[in-house]
Structures are given as structure tokens and as C-alpha cells.
Amino acid sequence: MPEILIVLCFLTMSLAIVLPNQHLTYSGLSEKRVIDQFTDNMHYIQQLSVQKGIVHTVYIDTSNNFYQMYKDWNSSILMTEEFPPDWEIELTSLKPYTSFNRNGTVNNPGTMWIHTNQKTYKIIFPFGRNGVVVHQQ
């Protein structure tokens, strides 16, 4: 009986240490997945602009935490993606409607911030064809 109690105490302490760290790791990975998906989508829309020779536009809705991509503003939506609802999206110098020219450059470069539960990301749409740059703060 004492051996069983010792083993149960050891298992309980091990779980108390491991489970909170596992949740933080999972949250960090899902956060990274969303940020990576956003940057991949921006590179994709930039490449579409170059390949098809057509201006493509991205609309970022900060109040509803989603973004949409268009071939041009008058066309139908190519793709809609959502940010988690508890994230705060802040457009500092970036316009809600950002477009990529036929040569892949950003028409109106700027910066946006994404504030998650754990981290803050600075996302830059720079001059030129550099795509999107993400800095974790």
C-alpha cells in the first residue's frame, strides 16, 4: 500500500509539472501556424500578381479579425482567412486595402501589429518586392 501511494504521488506531481507546459507549447504552435499562414498567403497573392500580370488586393478587417484576397477590387473573393477572435489586429501605417502591382511590389507599404495572448508581432509590407516581413516582439 505505501508503494502505491508513493507511485501515485509521483505521477500526480509529474502531471502537475508537465500539463501546463504542454498547453503553452500547443498555444505557441497554433499561434505560429496562423502567422505563417498569413505570410504564406501574402507571398501567394504577390506571386499571383506577377504571374498573371494583374493587380491583386488584400483587405484586412481589424474589427472582425479576418482578411480577404481579390484578383482586383471589382472581382470575386479568391480567399478568406480568419485570425483567432481574441487577437487584436492593429493597422498603424498599413491601409486596410493593400494591393500588389503587376511586378509584385506593394502599392501602399506599411506596418501592422498583431497582439496575441502570448506575443506581439510586427508585420511589415515593405517597399519593393520583399513580400511580407514578420518580427516577433
Image (cartoon, rainbow, N blue to C red):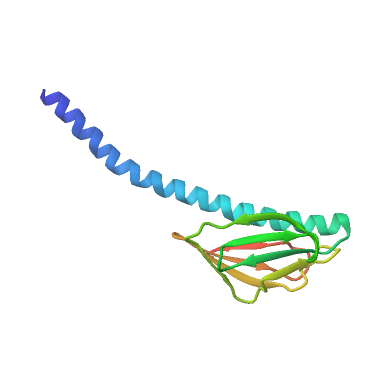
Q: Position of residue 89 (x, y in %)?
A: 55, 67
Q: Is 119 located above or below residue 7 in the figure?
A: below
The extreme bottom residue here reads 93
What quarter of the picture does the N terminus occupy?
top left
The residue drawn where x is 58% and y is 68% is 62
Among the 4 quarters of the image, the one containing residue 59 = bottom right
Determine the image quadrant of residue 125: bottom right
Q: Which quadrant of the view contains residue 101?
A: bottom right
Expressed as whole percent of the image width and height from the top left, the position of residue 73 reads 78, 66
| Residue beneath the point at 44% across and 47% down | 25
State the residue in front, 27 or 6.
27
Instruction: Please determine whether, in this image, residue 92 is positioned above or below residue 73.
Output: below
- Residue 135, given in percent of the width and then of the height, sits at 58, 63
Rendered residue at 29%/38% (across/down): 15
Judge from the rendering whether residue 93 lies leftward or rightward of residue 56; answer left or right: left
Q: Residue at x 66, y 71 (%)?
A: 96
Residue at the farthest left position: 2
Q: Is residue 69 left or right of residue 82?
A: right
Q: How many marks?
A: 0
Horizontally, residue 92 falls left or right of residue 51, namely left
Q: Is residue 84 above or below residue 12?
A: below
